Amino acid sequence: MEDFFCKVYREKIGLIYENDYFYSRFDRYPIAPGHAEVIPKRHVIQLFDLTSREWMFLKGALEDTVKVIESYPLKDMYTEFSKEFKEIHKNSPWYDEMSKNPGDAVTRDYSKKMLTHVGIDKTTDDYNFGNNDGPNAGRTVDHLHIHIIPRYLGDAVDSRFGIRWIIPELANYKK
């Protein structure tokens, strides 16, 4: 069965990293500059469906994707992605990717938001790593993908308790 992420890999759309078992790409609907996804090349739905060999390669994929995020010209990328495809110059380093998958109005809106994000001109301070392992956990594509979300000083009113904020009324256990 070919899903969205299988197609992305087959067509090499926007890949920023790959090893023998995983590839990475920037999320088209980022919540912070540099928000990326690490995705198994093999069609895997849940985290615990990975083989022991894939688990070994996952650590390197996460580490290497972080290095890509930290060295990538994010502001330039979001500037290009915020344009209509017809406005992107053929010499743009993102032209080939956008010609295969030009995105949509939502991608353009998210890219514009990244250009005004508090972290766009900053060095990443920390990261959230996570996946939505099932529909009740928020998974919308039935193919494992692990989010790497860079965090920047000042990007949230209160970043304490991290992912606990998915259930806001239970997030702060130190009240």
Image (spheres, rainbow, N blue to C red):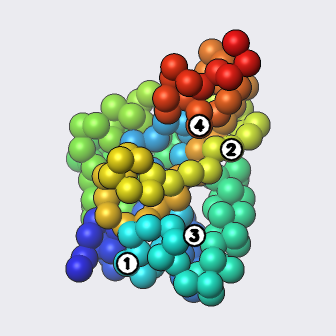
Secondary structure, mark 4, is helix
How far is mark 4 from mark 2, CA to CA? 11 Å
Compare marks 1 and 3 and give the one earlier in the sequence: 3
**Residue 74 visible from this viewpoint:** no
Reading the chain from its start, which is encountered first: label 4 or label 2? Answer: 2
- The amino acid beneath tag 2 is Tyr
Alpha carbons under labels 2 and 3: distance apart: 18 Å
Question: What residue is drawn where x is 28% and y is 37%?
Answer: 106
Foreground pick, 15 / 52: 52
Residue beneath the point at 69% across and 70% down: 59
Task: Name the residue beneath numbered marker 4.
Answer: 163
Mark 1 → mark 3, Cα distance in angstroms: 18 Å
Mark 1 or mark 4, earlier in chain? 1
Q: On the image, numbered disc 3 is attached to which residue? A: 17
- Residue at 70% in and 12% down: 175
Distance from the alpha carbon under mark 1 to that under mark 4: 26 Å
Quote the CA–CA distance across marks 2 and 1: 26 Å
* Residue 124 x, y percent position in the rendering: 72, 39
